[in-house]
Image (spheres, grey):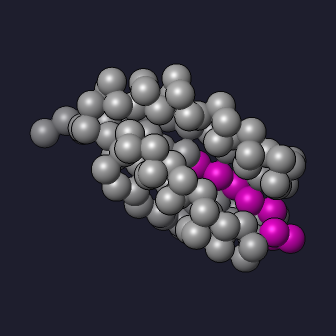
Amino acid sequence: MIIYNVTIKIQNSIHQQWLIWLKDEHIPEILNTGCFTQSNLLQLLETDDSEGPTYAVQFHAESKSDYNRYQELFSAGIRKKSHEKWGDQFIAFRSVMQVVN
């Protein structure tokens, strides 16, 4: 299993609106690509939240090819929509991990 992790630091001024959008629009849009089987939304603890909270969203893909399909076909458009809506009011970084049992 592959986990695509997106960690986001969000400004306090948009926090509540952004969280609603994330849950109601953004995560469902990514899941609806068919590239991922599930997601987890987490809030980081023990971080400096003075400028805003930090979240991680983890998307689970059954294979690296499913993740690659997301990157090739969907990622750029979805990122563009996020930046058009929220501008520079957030910082995101991404990582890809493989589950090791």
* Residue located at (56% from left, 68% from top): 23
Give left or right: position of 79 versus 39.
right
Q: At 45% from the left edge and 51% from the top edge, which residue is drawn?
A: 32
Residue 63 is one of the magenta-drawn residues: no
Residue 76, by quadrant, is top right
Placement of the C terminus among the 4 image quadrants = top left
The quadrant the N terminus occupies is top left
Q: In the depicted view, which residue is nearer to us: 87 or 69?
A: 69
Left or right of 99? Residue 22 is right
Can residue 47 be seen by looking at this rendering?
no
Q: Nearer the viewer, residue 84 or 60?
A: 84
Q: Residue at x 44, y 52 (%)?
A: 31
Residue 71 in the image, given as x and y percentages of width and height = 51, 28
**Residue 38 spot, x, y in % from top left:** 34, 55
Depicted 97 relative to depicted 84: above or below:
above
Q: Tell me which residue sits at (47%, 32%) in the image.
A: 70
Residue 82 shows in this picture: yes
Check if residue 10 falls in the magenta segment. yes
Residue 83 in the image: x percent, y percent? 79, 45
Magenta part of the chain: 7-14
**Furthest-left residue in view?**
101
